[in-house]
Image (cartoon, grey):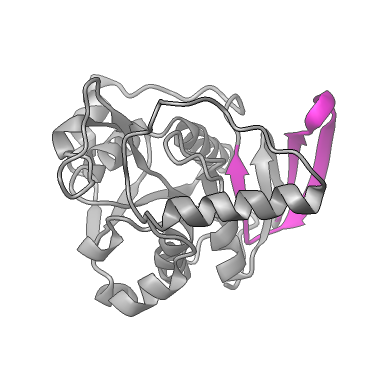
Amino acid sequence: MRAATIAGLRVKLLVPVKQVALLREGAVLDDAGRLAPEGLEWQLNEWDAYSVEAALALVEAEGAGEVVVATVGDEHAEEGLRAYLARGADRGVRIWDPVLRDADALAVAAVLAPLAARERPDLILCGAQSSDAAGAATGIALAGLLDLAHVAVVGAIERDGGRLTVERELDGGAVEVLGLSLPALLTVQTGANEPRSATLRAIKQAREKPLERLGLAELGLHVGAVGAAAGSRTVRLAEPEHEGGAQMLQGTAGEIAARIAAILAEELSQ
């Protein structure tokens, strides 16, 4: 990805966002081992509110620019995109294909990568993690696929032309200050800013803002490529068994590791 000449010009930011699924009370698995749609409640991912706000603030500081919010999801995800358009984002992009229903973080990153290559943003801002899977992997995987400089779990961002100065808190309360050149990717931590709310007028105006819907073919992808990019897959879902207590393992580190591997193999074979 090649950086644009941005000093004194418009800055373009791409912000991947996600609708997260929460379990409703009484949610159950169907005969196929899947959660029925009525057992899920969809809402905005908490971390994404901070990455979107950081993008809006950077554009406002520059005086001109564009914030593009993008998501990988079915029709439920459009509600989230519209919510961020109401807060000030300029365009939305939704990518979907049924094969993406169980996509993991690496597969999602592989789908976002060609979109980023097409959009050519100066900066990509992701939430540090999602509040359902909590893997904290999509943003970093996307940076790897695009060969971008990146910093994770950022709390403060300052831009000076083609360079950024960012801060992130380390264990123990120490603050690390890092500098990097654009284009780049950051994952933003909660508490980095104060996300704004949308006014009623902005909510109405958001309905008129562009929202593009793309399939895999339009990004030059195919079903096999998405499957090959995945690092994990769901084997099965099941209600946990509550009978019995914890099993204490004793022995050397190697003996304990071997016993854990045997337990996992036994459970996965059922």
Magenta stretch: helix, strand or loop mostly: strand
- In which quadrant of the rendered image does the N terminus lie? bottom right
Q: Is residue 220 visible?
A: no
Q: Is residue 29 above or below residue 263?
A: above
Magenta-colored span = 163-188
- In which quadrant of the rendered image does the C terminus lie? bottom left
Q: At 33% across and 24% down in the image, what residue appears? A: 198
Indicate whether residue 5 is drawn in magenta.
no
In the picture, measured across the screen, residue 244 lies left or right of residue 215, that is right
Q: Is residue 198 above or below residue 215?
A: above
Q: Is residue 213 above or below residue 40?
A: below
Q: At 20% across and 31% down in the image, what residue appears? A: 39
Q: Quick one: 159 or 184, which is closer to the camera?
A: 184
- Image quadrant assignment for residue 247: top right
- Image quadrant assignment for residue 97: bottom left
In the picture, measured across the screen, residue 5 lies left or right of residue 19, that is right
Indicate whether residue 178 is drawn in magenta.
yes
Q: Position of residue 4 (x, y in %)?
A: 58, 67
In the picture, measured across the screen, residue 35 lies left or right of residue 130, that is left
- Image quadrant assignment for residue 214: bottom left
Q: Position of residue 203 (x, y in %)?
A: 23, 29
Q: Is residue 36 above or below residue 69?
A: above
Q: At 54% across and 61% down in the image, what residue appears? A: 142
In the picture, measured across the screen, residue 181 lies left or right of residue 61, that is right
Q: Quick one: 179 or 259, which is closer to the camera?
A: 259
Q: Quick one: 151 or 183, which is closer to the camera?
A: 151
Q: Is residue 206 visible?
A: yes
Q: Position of residue 209 (x, y in %)?
A: 24, 45
Q: At 65% across and 40% down in the image, what residue appears? A: 153
